Amino acid sequence: MIRSHIVGCGAYLPGNPVSNAELARRVDTSDEWIQQRTGITQRYLAADGELTSDLALQAAQRALDHAGMKASDIDLIVLGTATPDETFPATATKVQAGLGMTRGAAFDVQAVCSGFVYGLSVADSMMKNSMAQTALVIGAETFSRILDWNDRTTCVLFGDGAGAVVLQAGQGQGTPADRGVLSNILHSDGRHHDLLYVDGGPSTTQKAGFLRMQGKEVFKHAVTNLADVVGESLAAAGLTTADVDWIVPHQANKRILDGTARKLGMSHEKIVVTVDKHANTSAASIPLALAEAVADGRIKRGQVVLMEAMGGGLTWGASVTRW
Ligand code: ACO
């Protein structure tokens, strides 16, 4: 059967890091509060005029370089973002043009912080249906543009960035021992819209709007939903938590990562944590963390890597890959 394999990873963080102390000079907050509640120490913010597509293009080029491939090898781009350059066209098509790629298809997926897991699932499904051979799956965001910098309960939590993987179709036996993506599980529940949303958009206010969040409620849903979907994705892959070598979670908050691991009875040492260095970068956070753990040699061939995320919608999902 067809199995899609991650054969390259790339990451891009814009500009210089902005520390909690620097943020505390313009927002009524403190390094101590932010670190204690979230584990975040700094974030990266895109410069004026630096767009989501610019960040995505850098990450995509780095993923291609890592895979030893050229843009002409790619026949699909799926880009997860909640902060597109424009209402339309899709930011993915701007990346396609930026790479000089003229064939195949490029489109965006909107699942907020779950955007990368959703995008990976879409690309994997298209490969399994022989609709694509080699894809770029990208998560890219400029959340700084939709933050209300007068709302200290949200603006300290997010940052800008992009990450990308190259996914290539291969063959497997259809067993848990196969290399490649073994399972994807996606969920959403639109009843929870008001817990995390942006109070604007083309059809409502004709302005981009600002992120609004009920933090405590989101926290509770995150730990429960993530633990459940991890169990589902492992069962679908024919594996258990004992088989997992690395959890690469959406990097929202260190306490959510710890709470989910505790609920699953999994060791903290297996979690790849980068939220401290770039805050919550929404759809970009999983490929940013993947790129780091692959580059520093933690993730090795044959190991089981579990990715999971939850975001506005609510949306959530998990994906199991044997590297
Ligand atoms: N600096 C200083 N004080 C602050 C700040 C801040 N930035 N923000 C809030 N406070 C104050 C509040 O005003 C409140 O003060 P009060 O007690 O005098 O009223 C106090 O800190 C506690 O506020 P809470 O909202 O109760 O803080 P809580 O412990 O719930 O932590 C947080 C807030 C970090 C947002 C937490 O609820 C959380 O992590 N939620 C998950 C949200 C999340 O990560 N969302 C990301 C998107 S979804 C996802 O990616 C999974």
Image (tube, rainbow, N blue to C red):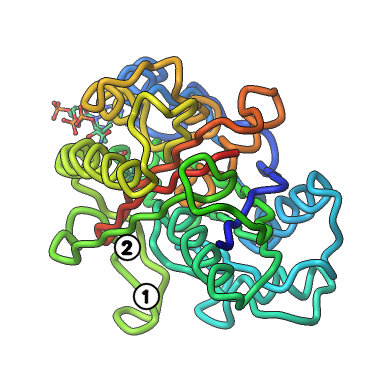
Displayed quadrant of residue 93: bottom right
Left or right of residue 285: residue 74: right
Q: Are marks 2 and 1 in contact (CB under 8 Å)?
A: yes
Left or right of residue 257: residue 247: right
Question: Where is mark 1, residue-wise?
Answer: 201
Helix, strand or loop status at disc 1: loop
Q: Is residue 200 above or below residue 45?
A: below
User: At x 39% / y 34%, what residue is drawn?
Assistant: 27
User: At x 57% / y 64%, what residue is drawn?
Assistant: 79
Helix, strand or loop status at disc 2: strand
User: At x 59% / y 44%, what residue is drawn?
Assistant: 179
Q: Is mark 2 within 8 Å of ligand 1?
A: no
Within 10 angstroms of label 2, few (less than 14), some, or many (20 or more) residues? some
**Viewer-side residue, 227 vs 101:** 227
Report the amino acid beneath label 2: Val
Left or right of residue 321: residue 312: left
Quadrant where the N terminus lies?
bottom right
Name the quarter showing ligand 1: top left
Q: Is residue 309 above or below residue 30?
A: below
Mark seen at residue 198:
2
**Farthest front residue?**
173
Residue 317 place in picture, x, y as percent: 34, 52
